[in-house]
Image (spheres, helix red, strand yellow):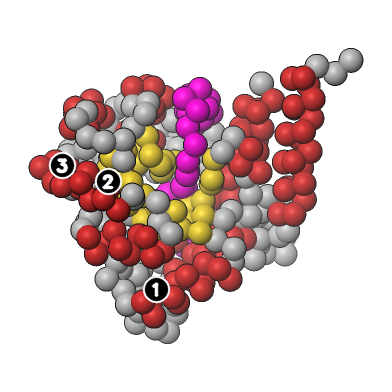
Amino acid sequence: MQTRRTMMKSVLFSSAALAIGRNAVRAEDASSDQAIYSGGSPWGNVLGWRLGSQSWTFRLFPFEEAVKKIASLGLRVIEAGPGQKVRAGDDLVISYDMTKAQRYVVRSILADHDMTMPTFGGTDVTPQAMEFALDMGIETLVTEPSPDMLPEYDKLAQQYGVNVAIHNHPNPSIYWDYKLTLERLKDLSPRMGICLDTGHFRRSGFEPVDVARAMKGRILTVHMKDLNNKGGPDCHDVPWGTGVCDIAGFMVELKRQNFKGVFHAEYEHNWENSLPEVGECARFFNEQSRKICMA
């Protein structure tokens, strides 16, 4: 006899399986003897999670090429940042002061690959940046401002209805210690929070699971990293689940918090040919999401 719980699991399995089938194509950059994961994250979608990549992962390529690479993995979201060339052979770069016509070029590239850009990183928070966000469908601006700017950023976030997420870089950056960041956020609105970078917190000596637990309610988006060691001179990104960051436990903790939001791979290694490794990150994320759904 099926219980309500087993019936729900069956429905979840069927929904995710259909999505996997739709995404099961070979990635564009796969060589004839190397298939790159292209199944997206249907199980993450079941949890209300969107998985994509920060365009910095593909910083050696134009934005259009980065979009193609991410879409080839079956993923449908990207986080761009200022300064990346939009297309090969063109001097146009992404920035929040783009004209309407220039923004249309970026939106067209996204639409051609069924992609959205819910977050935008590395930017100041100004009225102009907020107008850019509204025009581009951006939900969250990711920034690393002087702490004395946070109250003004909060006013703009509430005025425009766009979130502002502080990004943590490793020690000695100003937001390396999550406890200090929480202190700076405590009197601000829920539209102010953090873009939690698991690898950078690990480099600063903190376990990502502990940081996530402490920052419940302030996590707006995630830059996901796993590292080959805990911060030595040869420390670099590795596919999720193969390093020291306990990515599986981090995901379980965010599910416990009922987090609904965007996870971005920000893979800062093997720059010229990282797509297969980013694909393995997506594979791990989808499989771990499946385990969480079926638990």
Question: Dividing the image into 4 quarters, which one contains the N terminus?
Answer: top right
> Is tag 3's residue or tag 2's residue first in the polypeptide sequence?
3
Label 2 crowd (10 A; few <14 / some 14-19 / many >=20): some
Can you give x and y, in whole percent of width and height, for residue 116 in the image?
51, 59
Image point (22%, 60%), residue name: 127
> Residue beneath label 3, please?
151
Image point (27%, 61%), residue name: 129
> Is tag 2's residue or tag 1's residue first in the polypeptide sequence?
1
> Residue beneath label 1, please?
103
Image point (22%, 34%), residue name: 188
The three-letter amino acid code for the residue at tag 1 is Arg
Q: In the image, which disc is placed on residue 232?
A: none
* Secondary structure of the residue carrying numbered label 3: helix
Circles 3 and 2: CB atoms closer than 8 Å: no
Q: Residue furthest front?
A: 159
Question: Dividing the image into 4 quarters, which one contains the C terminus?
Answer: top right
* Secondary structure of the residue carrying numbered label 2: helix
Q: Residue furthest right?
A: 1
From the viewer's side, name the closer residue of 54 and 28.
Answer: 54
From the viewer's side, name the closer residue of 85 and 61.
Answer: 85
Residue 47, magenta (yes or no)? no
Q: Is residue 223 left or right of residue 32?
A: left
Can you give x and y, in whole percent of width and height, for residue 204 in the image?
27, 32
* Secondary structure of the residue carrying numbered label 1: helix
> Residue beneath label 2, please?
158
Q: Is residue 221 left or right of residue 155?
A: right
Of labels 3 and 2, the one closer to you: 2
Q: Specify the segment rendered in magenta.
A: 246-273
